[in-house]
């Protein structure tokens, strides 16, 4: 199964404002080309839906992408009609960490959790990265983040994620997660059950987990390097991919898979000593199994349901669609997906 983008430590890390401090003049960014990506705007249809069925039970699948044009508005009428006639909506697969502590215990954990985001022994990025890698970071930081001394003490994996977020915003893109939020809003409007396909990891010893993360955290240089690659070279492709999602151009989405830096970052976390100590080194497989179980249950019990997945989880080799096909379910692609047999027009249209 394709790896999903997960913030494995999001339950322990708390976003804290950092005070920008005056630093020496940053390195020149003249050697970094200015990317003038053009993104679509206005009301757009988005992609068609995949149809998975067994007998007269149907599960519709909506693919999302990690970034969308900032000024695009999704026309969700068709999806709303499907949601309104569904028994449930299945959320995208994700991971949730449950801390075995009470409210006050969580408060006491905050200082330690914040420290877990930083490099061990108070080191700065210039001390933990190679000189060439740090030079790349410095140039990109100057362009997209600016003067921020605090981030220099972050682990590379977290500094890279912050850089990526800032670069997206400056490129006229925004998070694609808002599509799932819209679908959930439609489900609530029509009183449709929302099924959480989250794999939950219960951490019995949160203090020990934080300590393990500090001492045996991710080998995140590869993740960091891939993130810099993405910011340096992938932004035009990401804009094209965002436009393709907006206009329903599935052929382009197949041609331009999502940035692979997420896989490198997920691997850095799940293959770390920290993950092994918590017994979650096989986390992606567990997440996949959790979502597939929810999909099978919906196809068995519901006349109709809708699920949200990333486009990579639909289009990549070894996707959830491949797994469902192998189990004997019928899978029909939306119109416009020339790589697959499209569903008949009548079956693609939302039930009324």
Image (spheres, rainbow, N blue to C red):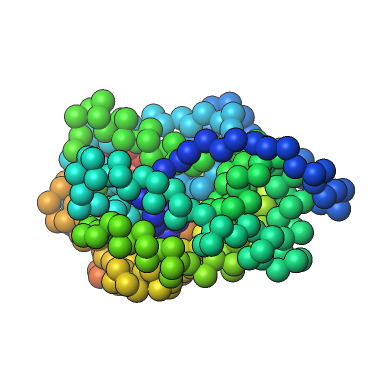
- On the image, the x and y values in percent for residue 327 come to 25, 70
- Please report the residue visible at 40 percent of the width from the left and 63 percent of the height from the top: 213
Position of residue 178 in the picture relative to residue 236 (left or right): left
Instruction: Tell me the quarter of the picture where residue 105 sits.
Output: top left
Screen quadrant of the C terminus? top left
Q: Is residue 318 above or below residue 87?
A: below
- Please report the residue visible at 41 percent of the width from the left and 31 percent of the height from the top: 76
Q: Please indicate, yes or no, whether residue 25 appears anywhere in the rendered image.
A: yes
Instruction: Tell me the quarter of the picture where residue 325 sits.
Output: bottom left
Q: Please indicate, yes or no, whether residue 341 appears anywhere in the rendered image.
A: no
- On the image, the x and y values in percent for residue 122 come to 56, 57
- On the image, the x and y values in percent for residue 183 come to 35, 36
* In front of the other: 128 or 146: 128
Q: Is residue 168 above or below residue 293?
A: above
Q: Is residue 119 above or below residue 10?
A: below
* In front of the other: 140 or 318: 140
Screen quadrant of the N terminus? bottom left
Instruction: Please count the marks in the image.
Output: 0
- Please report the residue visible at 80 percent of the width from the left and 44 percent of the height from the top: 24
- Please report the residue visible at 76 percent of the width from the left and 66 percent of the height from the top: 132
Q: Is residue 186 above or below residue 31?
A: above
Position of residue 99 in the picture relative to residue 321 (left or right): left
- On the image, the x and y values in percent for residue 228 come to 66, 57
């Amino acid at each position: 199964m394709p790896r999903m983008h997960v913030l494995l430590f999001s339950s322990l890390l708390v976003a804290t404002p950092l005070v920008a401090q005056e630093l020496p003049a940053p390195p020149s960014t003249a050697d970094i080309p200015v990317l003038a990506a053009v993104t679509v705007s206005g009301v757009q249809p988005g992609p068609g839906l995949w149809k998975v069925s067994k007998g007269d039970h149907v599960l519709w699948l909506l693919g999302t992408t990690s970034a969308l044009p900032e000024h695009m508005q999704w026309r969700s009428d068709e999806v709303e009609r499907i949601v309104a006639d569904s028994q449930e909506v299945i959320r995208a697969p994700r991971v949730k960490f449950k801390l075995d502590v009470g409210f006050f215990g969580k408060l006491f954990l905050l200082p330690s959790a914040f420290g877990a985001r930083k490099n061990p022994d108070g080191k700065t990025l210039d001390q933990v990265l190679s000189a060439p890698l740090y030079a790349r970071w410095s140039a990109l930081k100057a362009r997209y983040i600016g003067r921020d001394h605090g981030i220099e003490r972050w682990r590379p994996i977290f500094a890279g994620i912050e850089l990526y977020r800032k670069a997206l915003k400056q490129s006229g893109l925004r998070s694609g997660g808002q599509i799932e939020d819209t679908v959930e809003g439609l489900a609530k409007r029509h009183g449709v059950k929302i099924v959480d396909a989250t794999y939950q990891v219960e951490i019995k010893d949160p203090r020990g987990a934080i300590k393990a993360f500090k001492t045996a955290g991710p080998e995140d240089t590869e993740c960091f390097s891939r993130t810099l690659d993405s910011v340096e070279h992938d932004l035009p492709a990401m804009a094209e991919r965002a436009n393709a999602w907006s206009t329903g151009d599935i052929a382009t989405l197949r041609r331009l898979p999502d940035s692979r830096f997420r896989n490198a970052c997920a691997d850095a976390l799940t293959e770390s000593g920290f993950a092994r100590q918590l017994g979650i080194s096989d986390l992606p497989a567990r997440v996949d199994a959790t979502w597939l179980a929810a999909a099978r249950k919906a196809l068995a019990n519901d006349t109709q349901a809708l699920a949200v997945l990333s486009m990579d989880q639909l289009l990549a080799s070894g996707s959830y669609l491949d797994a469902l096909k192998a189990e004997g379910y019928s899978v029909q692609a939306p119109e416009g997906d020339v790589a697959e047999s499209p569903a008949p027009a009548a079956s693609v249209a939302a039930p009324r």
